[in-house]
Amino acid sequence: PVSIKQSGSWVGNKNIKAKASVRNMTLYLEFDLSELSYSMAPKTQRDTFPRTAFNLGFTSNGQPLKIEMNPQKHSWFYRNGIGTKETGLLDQTTDAKEMGITRTIEVSVPLFAFAKYPASQKVFIDVHLWQDYFITRDKPGKMIQNGVEYPTYSSDTLKTKLIDNVYSFALTVPEIYKSEIVCDSIVLQDDENWSPAGSDNTIWKSSLPDIYFAIHDMYGIIQGSSNVDKSTAVYTIGDTIPYYHYRAKERFSICVSDWDMLSKNDVLGYWQGYTDKFTNNKNYMLKFDHVHKFCFRRKYYGKIN
């Protein structure tokens, strides 16, 4: 566990308690919302605005924390609603929470987000948690921004700030190494046993897969490329994916998938190996599952902190 202190204000009876821990090279924060109740909203509008959302911002020594963003829509940060490529700030707004029902906010951040700090030294982090509006219970619509789906609401929100807390803790940053996986092209299997044509049967009647590739680390973090819609057997993807690791030699995986908007993505090929197998900036070709050729090179930057 990481020792965490809190300060701030809340109109309710008690502050929102928080705990922090580090495991599997990931920082986990959990905020206890069990004291949330409908009484938080103004009395005359409790039934109309029973939901709220929370904002989180990370700072150190009074300066907002910035992270290196993978600009692709399948990146870990975008999929988890953290940060934007415009600002690069380590911040987040939660989805709508039902007061009296939602019990916790859980946030996880991979430790490579703190790569700007020297290895083996303590960094003092503040997490600002605040709430400044209430939301109706109307059925939300959908909005897609930077490849991430967000809910939208038809009614106006009620602007009332009730929670403004800061949580402080110290974090020891590990050694962080950086590689980039530069994919030049992918050739899918196309023979009598399997073909891309007809492999993607969806409600949209498309018969060709929407392909992207992703890099998986040992700790459950996935960094993905953009997807190429309705791909034929041979195409150039031309994406560069950052891969952060915590030892010079570390296991990682490459996964090529068919992206589906409304259902689970189909895995077309999965490969696993070690970083030291690939010489810096040398061209390689892998063959695995339905991937006939995965042509790429690994750019190695070494230890970056």
Image: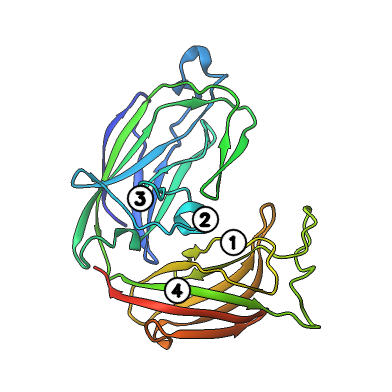
Image location (x, y in percent) of residue 3: 26, 52
* Mark linked to residue 88: 3
Q: Earlier in the sequence, mark 2 or mark 4?
A: 2
Task: Give the left or right position of residue 177, taking residue 297 as reference.
Answer: left
Q: Earlier in the sequence, mark 4 or mark 3?
A: 3
According to the picture, the residue beneath numbered tag 1 turns out to be 227
Task: Evaluate if marks 3 and 2 touch, with contact meaning CB atoms under 8 Å apart.
Answer: no
Which amino acid, mark 1?
Asn
Q: Is residue 27 above or below residue 87?
A: below
SS of the residue under disc 1: loop
Task: Give the left or right position of residue 254, taking residue 249 as reference.
Answer: right
Which amino acid, mark 4?
Ile
Task: Give the left or right position of residue 128, taking residue 196 as reference.
Answer: left
According to the picture, the residue beneath numbered tag 4 turns out to be 181
**Where is the N terminus found, in terms of image quarters?**
bottom left
According to the picture, the residue beneath numbered tag 2 turns out to be 73
SS of the residue under disc 3: loop
Which amino acid, mark 2?
Lys
